[in-house]
Image: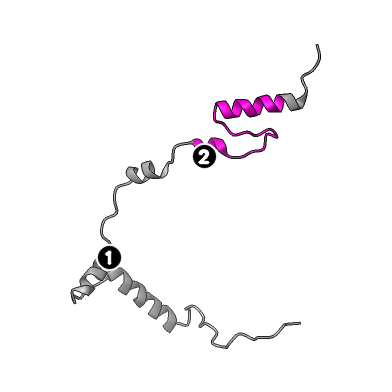
Amino acid sequence: MAAVPRARLLNLMKAQCEIFSTAYNPDGIRMGNKILRQRLRGPSLAKYYPPRGPTVNTLERVFKSLQLETINEEKEDRLEHLAGVRSRGKGAPKKKRTPPTSGKRK
């Protein structure tokens, strides 16, 4: 029995893809169609987790527009800790204030 020519098989595959509305891929290159056909996971993941409640920062912003003062203890503790660290000379180094050089380095 004689083998079927490749060109005829490709024409058959092309017709088959048109009929069943699939992607014509004669070289078998990975195209990601399997992944793209899958259902999106984002909405179901978003529904799984409960909505976020208000944080101190969001409440602070709302109350600032109403001219009310708020106390953020976490922020104050952090700033107090950083001030103590700086006073002992253990803080982060200061940033450079020199302008960048505009020449080629050798």
Which structural element holds mark 2? helix
What's the amino acid at mark 1? Thr
Q: Residue at x 20, y 76 (%)?
A: 69
Closer to the chain start, of discs 2 and 1, is 2
Counting from the top left corner in percent of width and height, residue 74 is at: 31, 68
Counting from the top left corner in percent of width and height, residue 21 is at: 54, 30
Name the residue that disc number 1 marks: 58
Disc marking residue 80: none
Above-or-below relation of 19 to 84: above
The one nearer the camera, 104 or 89, is: 104
Is residue 14 shown left or right of residue 94?
A: right
Marks 2, 1: nearer the viewer: 2
Q: Quadrant of the N terminus?
A: top right
Above-or-below relation of 19 to 80: above
Find the distance from the CA under tag 2 to the CA under tag 1. 37 Å
Disc marking residue 36: 2
Counting from the top left corner in percent of width and height, residue 102 is at: 65, 86
Residue 16: quadrant of the picture: top right
Counting from the top left corner in percent of width and height, residue 37 is at: 50, 36
Which structural element holds mark 1? helix
What's the amino acid at mark 2? Leu
Above-or-below relation of 32 to 64: above
**Magenta-colored stretch includes residue 56:** no
Q: Which residue is drawn at 36% across and 46% down?
A: 46
Give the magenta-colored segment's residue range.
9-37
Is residue 21 shown left or right of residue 55?
A: right
